[in-house]
Amino acid sequence: MTGRILVVDDILANLKLLEARLSAEYFDVLTAHSGEEALEILQAERVDVVLLDVMMPAMDGFEVCRRIKNSPKTMHVPVIMVTALDQTSDKVQGLEAGADDFITKPVDEIALITRVKNLVRLKTLNDEMMLRMATGMRIGALSGSLAARPRTESGGRILLVEDQERAANQVLSVLGRIHDIEIEPDLQAALLRLDARPWDLLIVSLNLREADGLRLCSQARSLERSRHLPIIVVVQAGDEARLLRALDMGVNDYLTRPIDRNELLARVRTQIRRKRHSDYLRDRLEETVELAVRDPLTGLHNRRYMETHLKALAEQAGTSDRPLSVVLVDIDNFKSVNDTHGHAAGDNVLREFATRVRRNTRGVDLACRIGGEEFVIIMPDTALERACQVGERLRECIAAEPFHADGKARLDLTASVGIATLDKSQDALEALFKRADQALYEAKRGGRNRVVADAA
C-alpha cells in the first residue's frame, strides 16, 4: 500500500527518524518544521495522512489539527497526534481538536505503520466514495454537500468477545457509561450475534482460554453484515506474532494489556466515528445509484438501466439459445387525464399503473418506465406465447378496476400492449424494439385496449 504522509515536527531528528521509517514501507513522505508550513503544504498538495507532533512553538499541534478539521479542503484528511507517553490529557484535548488517532512517544514501529496504513486505506476508500458523490451531484442525481458529516456524538453498539470475567468487566466499566456494550465469551455465539444485528464495533481478545480470537476476526471479515465492521483486538505485551497476523487479515486497531482507560475510550471513539462516516458515504452512494437507475415517480427502473441491462440479457439469451421477450405497454388516452384532472392526478395514475405492472410480472422480469405513459417489461427465457399471456393478464388488470386520480375522481382506463421476441435468428435489439413498437401501434390503431404480438 502506498500513500502520501505529511510529518510535522519542529525537531529535525524526529522528522528524519519518522521519514526513514515510513519511507522503508514505501510511503511518499513530506515534512514540515512548523504548523504554519504544514497548513501551507496541505493547501497545495494532496496528503493522505498527517503525522502531527503536539509540542511545537508558535502554533502547537492542537491548533494545527483544529485548522485542518475546520477547512473544507482538508477536513477529511486523517490526523495522527504524536503525544508524550505520560500525558493522558493530550489525548482528550486531541480528540476535541478532531484528531483521528494517537501515537505515544517513544514511537513503536508496529504502532506507527499500523495506524498509518489503516488511515491511508480508509482515506483512499473515502476519497473514492466522495469522488462518486461529486459525480452524482454534478449530474443532479444527488443533493447535499460533500462537507456534510454524519452525527457521531451518540454511543455505539459494541460486541466484546472476552471469556475472562475480570477483563470483561474492566472494559465494561470504562465503556458502559457511553456505549451499548454486550459481552460474549463464546466464539460461535459471537459469530451468530454478529450476523443477527448491526454493530458499530467488535472488540476481540486474542487471549481467549478455549478459542482462537483470530478465527473470529477472519470469519467476521467474510460475513456480509460485518465485512466493514471495525475490529479492535486486545493483545498481551510482546505478542507481536499474533498481532501482525491480526493486522494482516484486516483488523483495524489494537490495544495492549494492561489497557489504559483513556486510550481505550479514544480508540473506540475513533473507530466508531470512522465507521459512521464511511457508512454515511456508502449510504449516499447507494442513494445515488438508486436515483440514477430508477424512475423517481413510479419506482420502476428507468430507460438508462433498461438499455444497459437488456444488452446483458440479450447476450445471455444468445449464449443459452433461449428466447427473450419484450412487452411494451402504453396507457390509452392518457393525455386527457392530465388535461382534465391535472398533472398531480396524472402522477397518481402512473404510480398506480406501475403497481399493477409489478403485480403481474415475475421476479426475474424487468419492469421499467421508459417515458411518459409508456412502460416496458423485459422477460428472459420467455417465448412469444407466454409473453402474450402475461400481456393479456396485464391488460385485463388495467381495465378491471378504476384508477384513483385524486380524492374524488375514479377513472376507467385501458392499455394497449405490443410484444416481440428475440431468438437466435433475430439478434438486433434495435429491430426487436422496433417490432414491439410496431405491434403496439397496431394495437392502438385497431381500437386500443388490446394485445398485439409481432408476427415476424
Image (cartoon, rainbow, N blue to C red):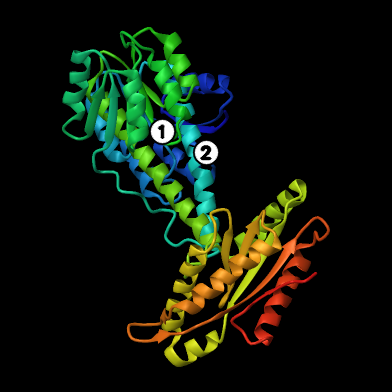
Question: Residue at 22% across / 28% down in the picture?
Answer: 89
Of 254 and 342, which appears nearest the observer? 342
The residue mark sitting in front, 1 or 2, is 1
| Label 1, label 2: how far apart the Cα atoms are | 20 Å
Question: Residue at 48% across / 38% down in the picture?
Answer: 123
On the image, the x and y values in percent for residue 323 come to: 72, 56
Question: Mark 1 falls on what kind of element?
Answer: loop
Above or below, 382 against 184 in this view is below
Would you say 251 lies left or right of 447 here? left
Would you say 334 lies left or right of 39 here? right
Of 30 and 25, which appears nearest the observer? 25
Q: Which residue is mark 2?
A: 124
**The C terminus, quarter of image:** bottom right
State which quadrant residue 165 falls in. top left
Q: Residues within 10 Å of mark 2 (few under 14, many from 20)?
A: some
Question: Residue at 52% across / 64% down in the picture?
Answer: 360
Would you say 245 lies left or right of 385 here? left
Disc marking residue 226? 1
**The N terminus, quarter of image:** top right
On the image, the x and y values in percent for residue 128 come to: 54, 45
Above or below, 349 against 264 in this view is below
State which quadrant residue 194 falls in. top left
Q: Residue furthest bottom?
A: 340
State which quadrant residue 92 falls in. top left
On the image, the x and y values in percent for residue 348 come to: 42, 77
Q: Residues within 10 Å of mark 1 (few under 14, many from 20)?
A: many
Q: Amino acid at mark 1?
A: Ser
